[in-house]
Image: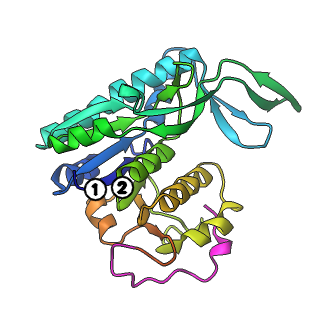
Amino acid sequence: MNAPLLVKVGGSLEDPAGLLDDLAGHPDPLVIVHGGHRARDRLSAQLGHPPRTVTSASGATTRYTDATGMDHMLMAYCGLVGKRVVLALQSRGRRAVGLAALDGGMVRGRRRADIRVREAGRTVVLHGDHAGTIHTVDVTLLRSLSDAGITPVVCPPALGDDGAPINVDGDRLAAELAVALGAARLVIFSDTAGLLADLDDPESVVREATLDDIASLGALARDRARTKLAAVSRALRGGVAAVGLCDGRRDRPLVDALAGAGTWFGVGQTSSPGDGSAPVPGSLAALRL
């Protein structure tokens, strides 16, 4: 198996038709990871168990996933969203198979069943959470599928150490798979154009940054942006040469990304696949993600 391109289709994309067109027509091997948080949240609300967001004792905002919430995640990610992606690819002529990260023991991790959160000014412990962190990755199944000319389409949850499914971050999942597969590039698509130097200016996309820049940006990042930067850092430190945070709403999202659109990160120097004509602004420390 040649090293695939690893692509993350963010759950924030309401209509990824253009991206699916590009993915179906990409000439080289692909492994696709997809999210589905919006579909899950809608389903949970419809089923009378709306999503619950809590603030951890450290001040981070996180999703509390109890047993019912995990059932909804399985329905939305592995069922509704995953099968729609597979059907869309196959209707465009690309063979695909949908998998959860837990299938075949592909991705395993440690469940954090008890979490400390802040509620009404005090710290309380919530039990029965299905959040977890990734510890081991086995890509044997993905390699077999790719060798057979089939595109794997992967989503959370992973398999917890107690045998229960665990909710792992989709961007981090994509990064871990990219490292394990020896992917040269990871492209993470969402509903933003990239990292902005000025939140009030959607044109202020930072074209290129380095692994060293991430360390200074991390203190300024908020919520999802902080998680995305952690995934970028993990991929680069694991040997992925370039990671892009790119706009999945464009007419040709993958084609444009591989030509340099979005924000591209490299280890020690800029690694955009485009011409690199746009320099990194000197005031990276001023970024608000």
Q: Which residue is mark 2?
A: 182
Look at the numbered discs 2 and 1 and tell me whether their residues touch, using CB distance below 8 Å. Answer: yes
CA gap between label 2 and label 1 equals 6 Å
Horizontal and vertical percent position of residue 96? 20, 37
The reply to whether residue 204 is visible in this rendering is: no
Q: Label 2 amino acid?
A: Gly
Judged by its main secondary structure, the magenta piece is loop
> What is the magenta range?
272-289
Residue in front for this viewpoint, 5 or 117? 5
Identify the residue at horizontal 65%, vertical 58% (top origin): 221
Q: Using the image, tell me which numbered label, if any, was put on residue 3.
A: 1
Q: Is residue 82 above or below residue 24?
A: above
Q: Is residue 89 above or below residue 98?
A: below
Q: Using the image, tell me which numbered label, if any, was put on residue 181.
A: none
Identify the residue at horizontal 49%, vertical 38% (top origin): 136
Compared across the picture, whether 222 is left or right of 255 comes to right
Q: Label 1 amino acid?
A: Ala
Residue 115 in which image quadrant: top right
Identify the residue at horizontal 23%, vertical 55% (top origin): 2
